[in-house]
Amino acid sequence: MNPDLLHLLDAPAQAGSPFASMLMPIAMVAIVFYFFVYRPQQKDEATRKELISSLQRGDKVITNSGIHGKLHEAKGETLVLEISPGAYLTVDRDAVKGKVGDPAPTDGKAAEGKK
């Protein structure tokens, strides 16, 4: 009998189950998704929550919809913004995107390139 033929007959027994061969790529995609999408998003959200909780009267803020205003009053889960002298707008705390004038958060690579 031809030795090459015996090698071909023995190959499927060594391959293992198809589930095990598909498990590795799925696990790799999950790991990449965690480190490049989920984890950075959690860090950004924690930073944003800290910023919102530290807002004080007089801080200039921008909302998610692009409205600029000065914090006039904080009432629980709502904020009263003065958008022009004598004009006030009540918004939800979660509608605040950030403080005006604060530098945008950057990663280390972008900061090194500016030096």
Image (cartoon, grey):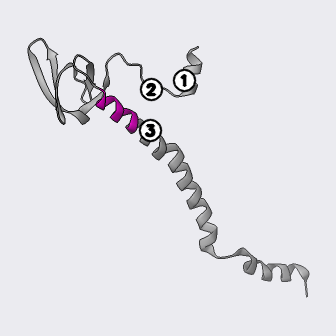
> What secondary structure is found at the residue carrying circle 2?
loop
Write the residue at 44% across / 38% down: 43
Q: Quadrant of the C terminus?
A: top right
Residue 43 vs 74, above or below: the answer is: below
Q: Which of the two marks, 1 or 3, is nearer to us in this view?
A: 3
Q: What is the C-alpha distance between the residues marked 1 and 3? A: 18 Å
Viewer-nearest of discs 2 and 1:
2
- For the image shown, how many numbered marks are present on the structure? 3
Q: Residue at x 58, y 26 (%)?
A: 109
Q: Decide whether residue 52 is among the magenta residues.
A: yes
Three-letter amino acid code of the residue under disc 2 = Pro
Q: For mark 3, what is the residue?
A: 43
Q: Is residue 41 left or right of residue 90?
A: right
Q: Which residue is mark 2?
A: 105
Q: Which residues are magenta?
A: 46-54
Q: Could you tell which of marks 2 and 1 lies nearer the N-terminus?
A: 2
